[in-house]
Image (cartoon, rainbow, N blue to C red):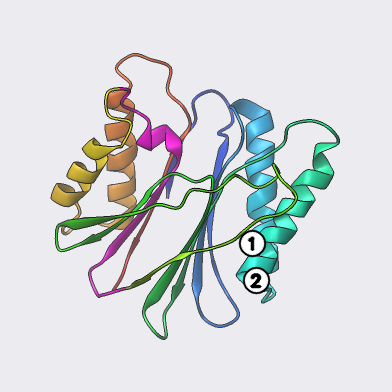
Amino acid sequence: MVSAAAAGASGDAAVTCGLPDGSLAFILSDGMGKGMKAAAESRAVIAKLRKLLKVGMPVAKAIKSVNKYMIEQSKGEEIFATVDLTIIDKKNGKAKFYKMGAATSFLVREGGVKRIEQPALPVGMIPRLKLTHVSAKLMPGDVIIMVSDGITEADRDDLSAGWLEAYLAANTINVGPRILAEEIVTAAQLRYKGREADDLTAVVAIIE
């Protein structure tokens, strides 16, 4: 995973952790706005969700608990953040994607790109959440890419991030996850063309 802050502290936060059942969790959160406030929001979401998942709490209950926590912390102010959670079950080779206000993720297989999208509000905005997820059967060589909206919205003339989809189709073969994440962030920075950039984060997982 690679991040580039727009100003000072990044409002994005990301972490990878193992779960009690042997699965792997990749968590990305984007706090509201930029700077220290956004950083505090995303880090609080990451820390609490990671803690709950690592003790074996079911995903839906964990996300709802984080939502409740954020609402309780708001005290009348707007405090919310996205949740982008991918869980890879190494036993059955399946991935589950949970998205609360999160940017599009991508699954690349042999040059073909599948978009992982799910409209939903970020955590901390409304008391009741309706949780669903997207599932995918993984194959060796598959590449999963999670990004913050600073990357998907880098090009004002291409807000559907078609440029990123094309880039991934052509540049994921024989590239390590760290290098690919760095290249995605750099490519997004160039798309801003002198405009002030948002926080940029890319998380990459390659299935072996």
> Image height check: is 111 above or below 19?
above
Q: Which portion, as a residue range, is magenta? A: 138-156
Instruction: Identify the residue position indicated by label 2 in the image.
Output: 54
- Nearer to us in this view, 105 or 180: 105
Q: Which mark is residue 50?
A: 1
- Nearer to us in this view, 63 or 8: 63
Secondary structure category for the residue under label 2:
helix
**Badge 2 density bin: few <14, some 14–19, many ≥20, Cα 10 Å:** some
Q: Quadrant of the C terminus?
A: bottom left
**Badge 1 density bin: few <14, some 14–19, many ≥20, Cα 10 Å:** many
What's the amino acid at mark 1?
A: Arg
Residue 155: in magenta span: yes
What's the amino acid at mark 2?
A: Lys
Q: Given contact means CB atoms under 8 Å apart, are the residues at marks 1 and 2 in contact?
A: yes
Q: Position of residue 193 (x, y in %)?
A: 29, 17
Relative to 12, 142 lies left or right: left
Q: Residue furthest right?
A: 75
Give the quarter of the image for residue 177.
Answer: bottom left
- Nearer to us in this view, 11 or 109: 109
Q: Position of residue 121 (x, y in %)?
A: 59, 45
x 57%, y 25%: residue = 8
x 33%, y 47%: residue = 181
